[in-house]
Amino acid sequence: MDYHPMPLIPARVPSPPFVRIDTNAIVTIGETKYTLRSSDRTIVGLRDEDGGDFKITHHALLALIRDQKASILRNRNTLEIKLLDLLYGDRGPEDYGKNTQVIAACRQALFIRYDKECLEKGHIPRSKDGTFANWIKRNWGEIVFNNRRSDTGAFTPSPPSPSTFERRYTAWKKSNHNILALFPPPFRSGQKQGFQVVG
């Protein structure tokens, strides 16, 4: 299965800001990849592939992520990512209809925008009082306009509800920002599948 990673941007930024890094994550700064050695409230300790140690403040690392000069790749060996491999196999975004591709691309752009705004302005509450639904509609309209495609005609996808946003955003984050998490699986629950037992 082709893997479609996106830069990992922390969704919440406490004060002072921290970078949330899993112990098995790969931190890429420029062309150099690092693993996590230590992290406290001020400094992140990293180690490169040659064994060299490197220290950087949370503030400086967040600034590099914001400028797209650094990224964090979580461990691929998670249940969510294994499930994607199992469900989708060799399928990729291009194997879906054009309208489905547009919906997935717009949702991914919406989630990236949400993460960036959280990084720059602090956490945006995903409340049910209508405030978050208005945020979704406002940003969705801009994203759909910017993602218009000549081959999809007049197709205009509807904005996700806050509950759909929550469900899809969580799946996208757990899959390490793999866009396939935003596509329907090749078979839905309830469909009968044939299996051949070899043995």
Image (tube, rainbow, N blue to C red):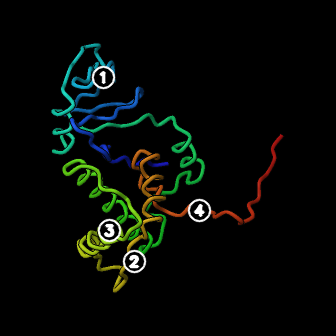
Residue bearing mark 2: 158
Q: Earlier in the sequence, mark 1 or mark 2?
A: 1
Residue bearing mark 1: 39
Q: Quadrant of the C terminus?
A: top right
Q: Amino acid at mark 2?
A: Ser
Q: Position of residue 156 (x, y in %)?
A: 36, 81
Which numbered marker is on residue 95?
none
Q: Position of residue 117 (x, y in %)?
A: 23, 54
Give residue 188's quadrant in the image.
bottom right
Q: Earlier in the sequence, mark 2 or mark 3?
A: 3
Residue bearing mark 4: 186
Residue at the farthest front position:
129
Q: Amino acid at mark 1?
A: Ser
The alpha-carbon separation of the residues under discs 4 and 1 comes to 41 Å
The alpha-carbon separation of the residues under discs 1 and 3 comes to 35 Å
| Residue at the spot 63% in from the left edge and 63% down from the top edge | 187
The alpha-carbon separation of the residues under discs 1 and 2 comes to 42 Å
Figure check: 67 above or below 185: above
Q: Position of residue 58 (x, y in %)?
A: 21, 31
Residue bearing mark 3: 131
Q: Position of residue 93 (x, y in %)?
A: 44, 61
Q: Amino acid at mark 4?
A: Pro
